């Protein structure tokens, strides 16, 4: 099992008018996902920016081409929401199908089985609209004391944290079921589409 299956670090990077860069990092390990740092740099502060993003998976906010240009010297992997959401939805659907099949094989014996419960994954999300999505599901996007320049960066980081936590809860729900076996019974800290990006 490769290292990314145990730990991953994600950085949300945003470039603002006035040559300013804000970064929020998220550390992901088995059963845990935490916001692990926040930075505010000038775009000319290349050394510090490169140090912060080194080894991380990048979620770019705003104009991705501008961010790729700024981080050009680093060998980085970029993430988007859609592959994560598609994989999470497919995994939930597959587990429900496995449950239905298992139950149908012996309806009498298994009628008291509790149907697994998974997060209702959206089709797609735009990390640039993280605050709107979080508020739409009743979550606080950012604390009121958050500096203006950090608001959208922090909201995106909090949304990433929320999605990872929902993925990990779904994974827990899957592996706790006796009809799930083989590789499906191994918990991954992130969907494979994001883990592959981290290799």
Image (spheres, rainbow, N blue to C red):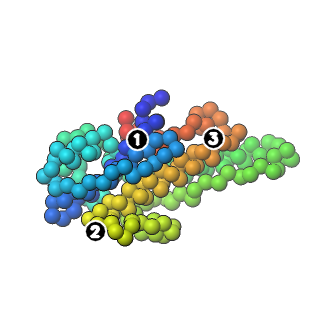
Give how far apart the Cα atoms at labels 3 and 2 are. 41 Å
Given this view, does label 1 or label 2 mark the residue nearer the observer? 2
What residue is disc 2 on? 148
Earlier-in-chain disc, 1 versus 2: 1
- Disc 1 and disc 2: Cα gap in Å? 28 Å
Return the x and y of residue 181 as percentages of the image width and height: 65, 35
Residue drawn at (58%, 33%), measured in percent from left and top? 183
Question: In which quadrant of the rendered view does residue 131 lie?
Answer: bottom left
Q: Nearer the viewer, residue 36 or 165?
A: 36
User: What is the x, y in percent for residue 73?
Assistant: 19, 41
Residue 90 position within the rendered picture, expressed as x and y whole percent measured from the top left: 56, 49
User: What residue do we see at 43% from left, 38% from top?
Assistant: 7
- When the figure is inspected, residue 6 is found, relative to residue 84, above or below; the finding is above
- Count residues near mark 2 (Cα–Cα under 10 Å), then give few for <14, some for 14-19, many for 20+: few
Residue occupying the far front of the picture = 145
Can residue 143 be seen here? yes
The residue carrying mark 3 is 175
Badge 1, how many Cα within 10 Å: few under 14, some, many 20+? many
Q: Nearer the viewer, residue 78 or 32?
A: 32
Q: The residue tagged with tag 1: helix, strand or loop?
A: strand
**Residue that badge 1 annotates:** 8
Outermost residue toward the left in this view: 44
Residue at 63%, 41% (x, y): give it: 175
Give the quadrant of residue 130: bottom left
Q: Secondary structure at mark 3?
A: helix
In the rendered structure, the answer to whether residue 90 lies left or right of residue 74 reads right
Residue 187 relative to residue 105: left or right: left
Label 3 or label 1, whichever comes before in sequence order: 1
Q: Residue furthest right?
A: 108
């Amino acid at each position: 099992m490769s290292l990314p299956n145990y730990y991953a670090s994600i950085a949300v990077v945003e470039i603002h008018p006035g040559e300013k860069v804000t970064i929020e990092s998220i550390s992901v390990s088995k059963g845990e996902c935490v916001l692990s740092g926040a930075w505010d740099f000038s775009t000319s502060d290349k050394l510090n920016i490169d140090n912060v993003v080194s080894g991380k998976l990048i979620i770019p906010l705003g104009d991705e081409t501008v961010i790729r240009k700024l981080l050009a010297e680093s060998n980085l992997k970029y993430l988007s929401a859609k592959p994560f959401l598609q994989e999470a939805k497919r995994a939930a659907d597959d587990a429900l199908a496995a449950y239905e099949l298992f139950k149908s094989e012996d309806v009498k014996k298994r009628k008291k089985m509790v149907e697994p419960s998974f997060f209702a994954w959206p089709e797609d999300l735009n990390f640039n609209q993280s605050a709107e999505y979080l508020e739409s599901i009743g979550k606080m996007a950012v604390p009121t004391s958050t500096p203006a320049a950090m608001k959208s960066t922090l909201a995106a980081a909090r949304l990433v944290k929320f999605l990872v936590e929902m993925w990990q809860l779904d994974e827990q729900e899957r592996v706790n079921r006796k009809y799930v076996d083989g590789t499906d019974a191994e918990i991954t800290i992130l969907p494979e589409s994001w883990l592959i990006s981290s290799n």
